Amino acid sequence: MSNENHLVQVVKEETKGEQWSNKLDFIFTMIGSLVGLGNVWRFPYLCYKNGGGAFLIPYFMFVLFCGIPLIFLELAVGQFTGQGGITCWTKMCPLFTGVGIGGIVCLSLSVVYYIVIMAWALFYLAYSFTNDLPWATCNHTWNTPTCLADTVTCNFTPGGNGTNYYNYTSPATEFWERKVLSISGGIDEVGELKWDLMLCLLAVWIILWVCLFKGVKTSGKIVYFTATFPLVILFILLVRGVTLPNAIYGIKYYLYPNLKRLGDAQVWLDAGTQVIFSNFIAFSMLPSLGSYNEYNYNCYKLQMQQHRVPFLTGIGIISFGIGLTMVTEGGMYVFQLFDYYAVSGACLLWLTFFESIAIGWLYGANKFYNALEDMIGFRPNPWMKLCWKFLTPTLCMGTLIYLLVDFKPLFYNGYEYPQWAQGVGWCLALASMLCVPLYALLRLLLADGPLYMRLKLLLKPEHDDLETWSRLRRGLPVVVTPDAQSNISSTDFKLTAL
C-alpha cells in the first residue's frame, strides 16, 4: 500500500465518529432538551415574581440577542469541529477551552440538584394514584389545625364576617412543605433522610442511566416520547387552566405589567437565566449534540424552526451524594443554594460572554461565516454575526455588572442564609466561572516562547485553512507537505506511523 493510500485510510479512521441514526433522532433530541419542567413551572413563577407582563420585555430581548444566536452558534461549532463541548473550543480557540470546562461544571452541578425535581414529580405521580388525594384534604398526620380544604366560602377580606382565609393554609401547601419537604428551621438543621423521596431519586437516576448508557443510539429513540409528552401535558394544562372558574382574572393578574420592576437587576438576571438555562446554552451540551451531525447538515434551518418550541411553551398561559442531602428535612435550603449560586445567571452570562467573544472576535465572525457557507451551502442571516460580535456580549456583560452592583444575598421564605452558607454558594458559582481565566493562565504558563508568541499560538485554531478542515470532516484525503505537516494535530493523524 502506498503512503498516499495509507494516509487516506488514516484520515477516514480518525475522522469517523458516532452519528445520529437519522435526522429525526437529532430533531427530537433537540426538542426534548429544550422543553421540560422549566417551561411548566419556572417561567410562570418568574413572570409572576418579576412584574407579570413587564417580564416579557427583558425575556424577549434575551431571546433575540442571546437565545437564538447562541443556540445556533453552539450547534454549528459542534458540527463544524465534530467534537464535544470541551474539545470543540480547543480546536476553535485553545485559550478559551475553559468555556467548555466551565459549562461541564455547570451541567454537573445542575444535574445533581435539578434531578431532585424529577424525584418530586415522581413522588407526586405515585400519590396521584390514591383514592384520597393527600393534597386535597386535611385529615392526614402532617396537617395542622390551621389547614383548611374548603376555601370557596371563605371571606378573603380580613375582618369580615366569614372565615379569615389569611389565618389558614391549604392542604396542598401543607402536603408540599410538611409531607414532601418536611422543611426544617434552617440549612444547618439537616434532619433525617426521607426514605420515600430517596427511593424516588434512585428510580430517576436508574431511568436516566437506562436512557443514556448506549449513547445516541438509544437516547435518540427514547426521546421520541420524552420530547412529545411534555408538549401534550402543556396543552392539557393550558386547556384545563383557561376553563377554570374566574380563570380570566388569574390570567390578567399573572400578565399585568408592573413596569417599575424593570429597574431591578434581578428581573433582568432572571430573564437571561430562564432563556439560557431552559435552552441549555453554555452547558457544553449543544456542541455535543451538533457534533453527531453530518458535516453538511442544515442546522441553521432546524434551529430557526425549532427555537419557537421552548419560547412559545415558556410563555404559555399556565399559571400553575448532594441529591440525597436534598431529600432530607434541610433539603429545600440546599436546593435553593444550588439554584441561586451554582447554576445562577451570573455563571451562565459569564460563559456566554466568552463564547461570543471567542467566535465573534478571536476566531472571527466573518471567518466562521465562511465555514458555515462551506457546511450548509449559504451564509446565514447577518443578524447572527451582529449578535455574536456586539449585542450578545454587551447584553450579557451589562446584565452581569448590573447584578454585581445590585447584588442581594439569598433569602428563602423569609429565611436569611448564614454567612458560611453564602460563602459555600459563591464557591459553587466560582467553580465554573474561574475555569475560563484559570485555564487560560495555565496554558500561557505552560507554553514555550515569548508571551506574545504564546498568545498567538493559543488564539490560533487547529487548522487555519478552511479547505483542510472541511476535507478532514468529510473524511477526504489531505495532502500533507512538510510545511503543512506542522499545522496538523497529532490527534487527527498518526504521522509517526507513515
Image: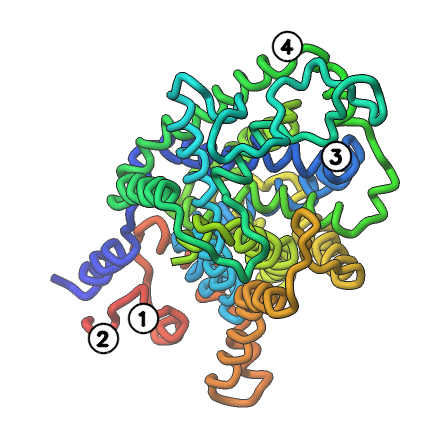
Q: Which residue is mark 2?
A: 496
Task: Find out whether the residues at labels 4 and 3 contact each other: C-beta distance under 8 Å.
Answer: no
Q: At 57% across and 62% down in the image, what residue appears?
A: 363
In primary-sequence order, the first of circles 2 and 3 is 3
Local packing at callout 4 (Cα closer than 10 Å; few below 14, some 14-19, many 20+) is: few
Identify the image quadrant of the C terminus: bottom left
The mark closer to the camera, 2 or 1, is: 1
Q: Quadrant of residue 48?
A: top right
Residue 79 vertical position relative to residue 434 in the rendered view, above or below: above
Amino acid type of the residue tagged 4 in the rendering: Thr
Residue ID for mark 4: 243
Distance between mark 4 and mark 3 Cα atoms = 24 Å
Which badge, 4 or 3, is on the more N-terminal residue? Answer: 3
Viewer-proximal residue, 335 or 127? 127
Residue position marked by numbered label 3 in the rendering: 56
Give amino acid for label 1: Ser
The x and y percentages for residue 377 are 50, 39
The crowding category of the residue bearing disc 1, from other C-alpha atoms within 10 Å (few below 14, some 14 to 19, many at least 20), is few
Q: Amino acid at mark 2?
A: Thr
Rendering coords of residue 114 (x, y %): 48, 46
Say whether residue 467 is visible. no
| Mark with earlier residue (4, 1) | 4
Q: Which mark is residue 490?
A: 1
Gap in angstroms between the C-alphas marked 4 and 1: 63 Å
Q: Are marks 2 and 1 in contact (CB under 8 Å)?
A: yes
Disc sitting over residue 429 in the figure: none
Looking at the image, which residue is at 51% across and 76% down? 457
